[in-house]
Image: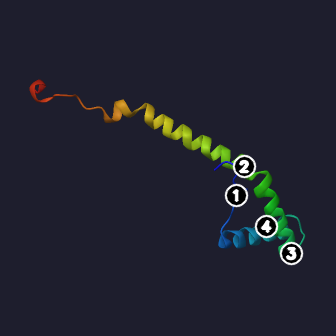
């Protein structure tokens, strides 16, 4: 994963992101922008902010799995040789 380029979106996701950016500008900035400007902004956001968001997601996933792994004994432990200890 190291050296991998910025976050890559599928063609469908890129199309939806472009439309969302254009709509945001139209509704919140009172400015119409074209596909090129929307694509440039999307590329900037993916390259500049994407790694920060990605790293946070990885940290959250790691914390989730570490929390679950720490509780494995409590959740999954089974007594060994239980036949004779049944009362």
Label 3 to label 4, Cα distance in Å?
10 Å
- 22 with respect to 58 (left or right): right
Give the CA distance from mark 1 to mark 2: 8 Å
Percent across and percent down for residue 28 are 84, 64
Which residue is painted at 90% across and 70% down in the image?
31
**Do callouts 1 and 3 mark residues in contact (Cβ within 8 Å)?**
no
Q: Where is residue 77 in the image (x, y as percent from the top left)?
A: 30, 32
The numbered disc on residue 7 is: 1
User: In which quarter of the view is residue 33 placed?
Assistant: bottom right
Cα distance between the residues tagged 1 and 3: 22 Å
Quadrant in the rendering for residue 79: top left
Please name the residue shown 11% across and 27% down the image. 86
Q: Which of marks 1 and 2 is nearer the N terminus?
A: 1
Label 2 SS: helix
- Tag in front: 4 or 2: 2
Is residue 27 shown above or below 82?
below
Q: Are marks 2 and 3 in contact (CB under 8 Å)?
A: no
Count residues near mark 3 (Cα–Cα under 10 Å), then give few for <14, some for 14-19, many for 20+: few
In contact (CB < 8 Å): disc 4 and disc 1: no
Q: Which of marks 2 and 3 is nearer the N terminus?
A: 3
Residue at label 2? 51
Q: Which of marks 4 and 1 is nearer the N terminus?
A: 1
Query: Which residue is pictured at 73% across the width and 53% down the height?
Result: 50
Nearer to us of marks 1 and 3 is 1
Query: Which label number is shown at residue 21?
Result: 4
Which mark, by number, is residue 34?
A: 3
- Pick the front one: 24 or 39: 39
Q: Give the structural element (helix, strand or loop) at label 4.
A: helix
């Amino acid at each position: 994963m190291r050296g991998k380029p910025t976050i890559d979106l599928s063609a469908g996701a890129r199309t939806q992101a472009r439309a969302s950016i254009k709509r945001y500008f139209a509704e919140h900035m009172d400015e119409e922008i074209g596909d090129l400007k929307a694509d440039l902004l999307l590329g900037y956001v993916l390259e500049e902010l994407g790694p920060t968001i990605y790293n946070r997601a990885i940290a959250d996933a790691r914390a989730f799995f570490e929390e679950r792994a720490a509780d494995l004994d409590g959740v999954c432990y089974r007594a060994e040789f239980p036949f004779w200890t049944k009362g």
